[in-house]
Image: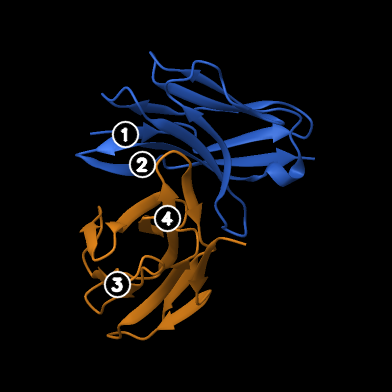
Amino acid sequence: DGGITQSPKYLFRKEGQNVTLSCEQNLNHDAMYWYRQDPGQGLRLIYYSQIVNDFQKGDIAEGYSVSREKKESFPLTVTSAQKNPTAFYLCASSTTAYGYTFGSGTRLTVV
Amino acid sequence: AQTVTQSQPEMSVQEAETVTLSCTYDTSESDYYLFWYKQPPSRQMILVIRQEAYKQQNATENRFSVNFQKAAKSFSLKISDSQLGDAAMYFCAYGGFTSGTYKYIFGTGTRLKVLA
């Protein structure tokens, strides 16, 4: 079955550490996205990629980095520069007309 | 710039009753898509229904239907015969071109409580 796989489901980060969240899709979608969701809030766009080897900053890109070396993969690195990284992170891919397919999310907690 | 507004942070409905969630949006484009997503406590985002802007007919999926008013830029979701499993966050989303790039913009969500 086609879909998006995010891993890990839960992630704990120490202060000053970089961590990488994985997102893999086998839907053959060109576009992939990373969103952050805080309690009681909507989805805020971090980064997105329309094509391999190209990506753009979203609304809250500071403290995050991404790569898009393969069509299937769009990992997100939360760097030590991100001062408040505790949140729920959602990866999505899309075709133009049919909306997003979302992964199941990663819950990141700073310890 | 395109915006999506959900003005009801929380709604309650009695089981088996009908509830309508509101969504308004702003765009200067004529060709776009609108979506409603459901996020239950598991936090998995689930597509509930989609509407193509060029279609005047309102989309329907079983107990879920929309009232799409293009001129008023309104896209409300009606849930009929509400069930306990409908309790979730509901997000309205716009899909269209923004500054030359195809993107999706989400509202802030409406939390729906279903009372037994």
Front one among B11 and A60:
A60
Distance Cα–Cα, label 3 vs label 4:
14 Å
For marks 3 and 4 on the same chain, the one whose residue lies earlier in the sequence:
4
Comes first in the chain, label 2 or label 1: 1
Residue at (25% x, 79% y) in the render = A80
- Quarter occupied by the N terminus of chain B: top left
Q: Residues within 10 Å of mark 1 (few under 14, many from 20)?
A: few
| Disc number placed over residue B105 in the picture, else none | 2
The C terminus of chain B lies in which quarter of the figure? Answer: top right
Give the letter of the chain under mark 3. A
Determine which residue is flagged by label 1.
Answer: B3
> How many marks do you count on the picture?
4
| Image location of residue A45, percent across then percent down | 32, 54
Q: Amino acid at mark 4?
A: His
Element carrying mark 2:
strand
Q: Is residue A61 left or right of residue B62?
A: left
Labels 3, 4: one chain = yes
Which residue occupies 30% across, 83% down? A18
Disc 2 residue type?
Answer: Ile
Tell me the blue chain: B
Question: Which chain is indicated by disc 4?
Answer: A
* The hue in which chain A appears in the rendered picture of the protein: orange
User: What mark, if any, has residue A10 been given in the picture?
Assistant: none
Confirm or deny contact between disc 2 and disc 1 (CB under 8 A): yes
Rendered residue at 31%/34% (across/down): B3
